[in-house]
Image (cartoon, grey):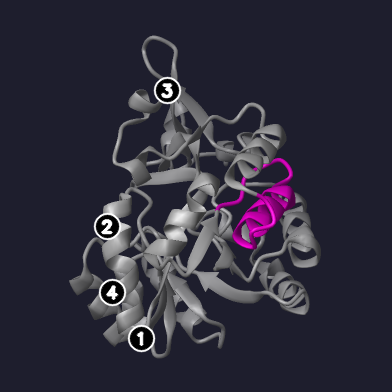
């Protein structure tokens, strides 16, 4: 089973962003890294001149590198950037069906594309998909159906296995509105929250996280205890989504678990020690609400 690091979803300072990928290149025992802006095209100019050097560094570190398209392509400029991405010669992961318009070779599919059944999986395979990361809200019963179907279609099926779960994208910026700003004059306030802005319920319980135009879970999805079952289902790869803290350590735990060097209990204990303030969840996989698992 392979390990993939998904695209960095948050707005970090460019030097911190660059240093993150340098560590991933040199130290993280993963197979594939997806790089690029998925959430907000306004963030991309801050680090787009470093993409080439980051890609080169990751490739020198033995990683397969894939470029990520935006999750919501709306403007002419964004569509032009998507077309240029496909012309770059590097593999591309689409996160919006609109990006299929420029796919002229094999591509990957990210978790923001709604792949809920075998028919969609087969369609994407016919279009040239190499791998598909399933939407994180799918339960194990769906994964057990789609993973073998993907193998039959020649597509690797990947499952979201670690990180705050992406729930929705919007044309409006929640982060800006929370600070009394508009999307067009947001002042990039999302950069103040390295893992998103916590949103509480009316009775003060952590509920969601806001990341610019994206809504996410507050809890971190963590399927380190479910890897054996995912392997039996035929899952080809696990996706780990970048968070602050020692993410290389997270990658090492998953690698050790996938390789059978540690059991599920030790994996969960190590991840909890590395992330003492982060509540974990796997309710989507079980088809149960988070409240039932508390």
Question: Closest to the observer: 34 or 227?
Answer: 227
Q: Quadrant of the N terminus?
A: bottom right
Horizontal and vertical percent position of residue 25 = 75, 67
Distance of mark 4 from mark 3, alpha carbons? Answer: 34 Å
Picture quadrant where residue 115 is located: bottom left
**Residue behind mark 3:** 294
Q: Secondary structure at mark 3?
A: loop
For disc 2, the neighbor class at 10 Å (few under 14, some 14 to 19, many from 20) is: some
Q: Which residue lies at the image location 69% right of the left edge and 56% below the top edge?
A: 261
For disc 1, the neighbor class at 10 Å (few under 14, some 14 to 19, many from 20) is: some
103 left or right of 191? Answer: left
Picture quadrant where residue 129 is located: bottom left
Distance of mark 1 from mark 4, alpha carbons? Answer: 15 Å
Badge 2 or badge 1: first in the primary sequence: 1
**Residue behind mark 4:** 149
**Residue behind mark 2:** 142
132 left or right of 246? Answer: left
**Residue behind mark 1:** 128
Horizontal and vertical percent position of residue 165 = 44, 44
Magenta stretch contains residue 246:
yes
Badge 1 or badge 3: first in the primary sequence: 1
Res. 35 in view: no
Mark number, residue 171 = none
Distance of mark 2 from mark 1, alpha carbons? Answer: 22 Å
Res. 78 in view: yes
For disc 3, the neighbor class at 10 Å (few under 14, some 14 to 19, many from 20) is: few
Q: Which residues are magenta?
A: 241-262
């Amino acid at each position: 089973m392979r390990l993939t690091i998904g695209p960095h979803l948050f707005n970090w300072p460019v030097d911190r962003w660059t240093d993150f990928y340098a560590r991933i290149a040199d130290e993280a025992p993963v197979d594939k890294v997806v790089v690029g802006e998925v959430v907000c095209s306004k963030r991309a100019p801050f680090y787009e001149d470093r993409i080439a050097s980051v890609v080169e560094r990751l490739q020198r570190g033995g990683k397969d590198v894939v470029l990520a398209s935006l999750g919501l392509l709306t403007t002419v400029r964004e569509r032009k950037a998507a077309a240029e991405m496909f012309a770059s010669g590097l593999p591309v992961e689409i996160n919006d069906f609109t990006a299929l318009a420029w796919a002229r070779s094999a591509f990957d599919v990210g978790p923001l594309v709604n792949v809920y059944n075998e028919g969609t999986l087969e369609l994407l395979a016919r279009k040239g998909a190499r791998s598909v990361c399933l939407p994180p809200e799918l339960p194990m019963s769906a994964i057990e159906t789609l993973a073998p179907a993907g193998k039959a279609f020649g597509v690797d099926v990947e499952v979201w296995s670690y990180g705050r779960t992406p729930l929705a994208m919007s044309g409006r910026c929640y982060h800006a509105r929370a600070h009394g700003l508009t999307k067009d004059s947001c002042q990039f306030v999302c950069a103040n929250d390295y893992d998103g802005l916590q949103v509480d319920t009316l009775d003060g319980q952590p509920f969601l996280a806001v990341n610019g135009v994206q809504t996410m879970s507050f809890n971190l999805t963590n399927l380190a205890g479910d890897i054996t079952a995912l392997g039996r289902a035929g899952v080809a790869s696990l996706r780990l989504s970048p968070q602050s803290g020692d993410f290389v350590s997270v990658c090492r735990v998953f690698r050790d678990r996938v390789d059978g060097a540690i059991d599920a209990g030790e994996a969960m204990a190590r991840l909890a020690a590395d992330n003492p303030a982060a509540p974990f969840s796997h309710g989507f996989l079980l088809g149960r609400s988070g409240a039932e698992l508390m």
